[in-house]
Amino acid sequence: MDAVNSNQQTILLVEDEPTGIAFAREACALCEPPIQLVVVEDSIEALAWLSHKAKDKDRLPHLILLDLKLPKLSGLAVLRRLRMDKLTLELPIIVFSEVCEQSDILLSYQIGANSFVNKPVDIDQYRELLRELAAYWLQPRQRKLAFVSQ
């Protein structure tokens, strides 16, 4: 597990596949500005890490990439727990999976996922996914939209 650098945008990757982790690390290193990637390899570790970081809200990641199929607890169980905690309720959580079944997608959104995407299978797909996620979720102007009432 890596430490969070508060001066850098941080993504928490909850992933147990070594190839996917390697692709994500390489893609984050190629981003401009660089994105700090924190990797946890199972659901229990993810919940423990987030619980520890939630004590200092400024140390929480800016975005969570959550694999649907995890050992110990499923990604949906992790998502449910995070959405029940007021400290992680508003964290953007992107669920991803190699197999995108309609029931998993619908349940992910019902529980509170911000998005559901196909798991990238190579470095180019990871780079593109991170570019899109960074543009949408990590840019300050995108986080809080003001709506004007008339």
Image: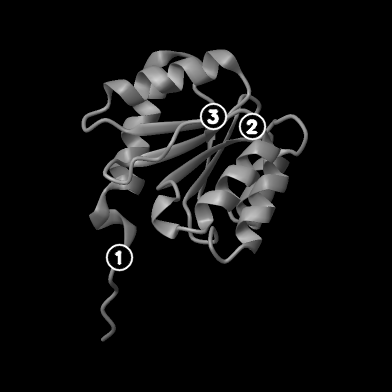
Residue 113 in sight from this viewpoint: no
Looking at the image, tell me whether mark 2 or mark 3 is earlier in sequence order: 2
The residue wearing badge 3 is 118
From the viewer's perspective, is residue 4 above or below residue 90? above
Circle 1 residue: 145
Q: Is residue 82 above or below residue 73?
A: below
- Foreground of the two, 24 or 46: 46
Colouring used for the render: one colour
Expressed as whole percent of the image width and height from the top left, the position of residue 21 reads 51, 20
Q: Pointer 3: residues within 10 angstroms few (<14), some, or many (20+)?
A: few
Q: Secondary structure at mark 1?
A: loop
* Residue bearing the label numbered 2: 100
Residue 75 point in image, percent of width and height: 67, 40
The residue sitting at 47% across, 51% down in the picture is 92
Q: Earlier in the sequence, mark 2 or mark 1?
A: 2
- Label 3 to label 1: alpha-carbon separation: 27 Å
User: Is disc 2 in contact with disc 3, using a CB cutoff of under 8 Å?
Assistant: yes
Q: Which corner quadrant of the image does residue 150 belong to?
A: bottom left
Camera-nearest label, 2 or 1: 1
Q: CA distance from mark 2 to mark 1?
A: 30 Å
Indicate the amino acid at tag 3. Answer: Asn
Residue 91 in the image: state x and y as whole percent. Answer: 48, 54
The quarter holding residue 96 reads top right
Image spot of residue 148 (x, y percent): 26, 78
Spatial CA span between label 2 and label 3:
7 Å
Residue kind at label 2, given as amino acid type? Cys
* Of the pair 79 and 132, the residue shown nearer to us: 79
Amino acid at dot 1: Leu
